[in-house]
Amino acid sequence: MELKIDKPYPEIKVENENIYYAQLLQEDYAGPSSETTAIMQYIYQGFDKFQMNPEFSRIISQIAMVEMKHLELLGKTIKALGGKPEFKFVNKKKYIEFWNGSFVDFRTHFKDMLIRDIELEKDAIKSYYKHIKLIDDKYIKVLLKRIIEDELVHLECFNKMLYMISESDEM
């Protein structure tokens, strides 16, 4: 099962430095539904299910590695925009908030994990689409669209796994 689109990532470029755009991307970098949160959640889940479900552990670990690539690309873009790729973001109340472990869902029931993973991927995709609308930089738009393609693959993977376990529950 492929866990990312078989297509290269675009070169990291920006039209101009823009701190506002960097701040928007910080949310994708280190917010509650960010790449950082996804990485930490998926690594935790892989450890939790390693012996009980080694195939899920393998898949979720590979997805975490794809998310690490996204984190790297976002960090380089934030830097190119003149920002600092720090683990903080501007929250809805317009305050700076630092990433923290409370963003990770530590459920251990397999079905609950998958439901939360689906929510996390949907939230990330929604955030990327929102930022595509707010950012007027052709290079950043191409990058975010490419990341969305991977996130859609992850979403499909989690939905398939959830369907499979739901089917087995009914038997």
Image (cartoon, rainbow, N blue to C red):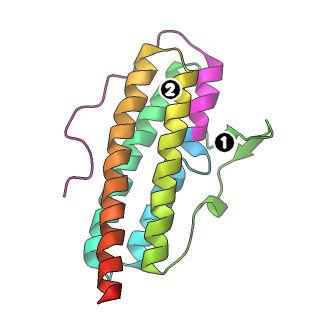
Instruction: Check disc 2 and give the amino acid type.
Output: Ile
Q: Is residue 21 magenta?
A: yes
* First to last magenta residue range: 1-27
Residue 100: percent from the left, percent from the top? 66, 56
> Which residue has dot 1 on it?
88
Left or right: where does residue 124 sit relative to residue 149? right
Residue 44 visible in the current orientation: no
What predominant SS class does the magenta segment belong to? loop
Residue under the point 57% across and 67% down: 105
Residue 130 among magenta residues: no
Q: Please tell me which residue is depicted at 50% across the width and 26% down the height of the picture.
A: 132
Image quadrant occupied by the N terminus: bottom left
Crowdedness near tag 2: few (<14), some (14–19) or many (≥20) residues, C-alpha within 10 Å: some
48 to 160, vertically: above or below: below
- Whether residue 129 appears in this view of the structure is yes
Disc 2 and disc 1: Cα gap in Å? 20 Å
Residue 18, quarter of the rendered image: top right
For badge 1, the amino acid type reads Lys
Percent of width and height locating residue 142: 38, 23
Return the residue at label 2. 132
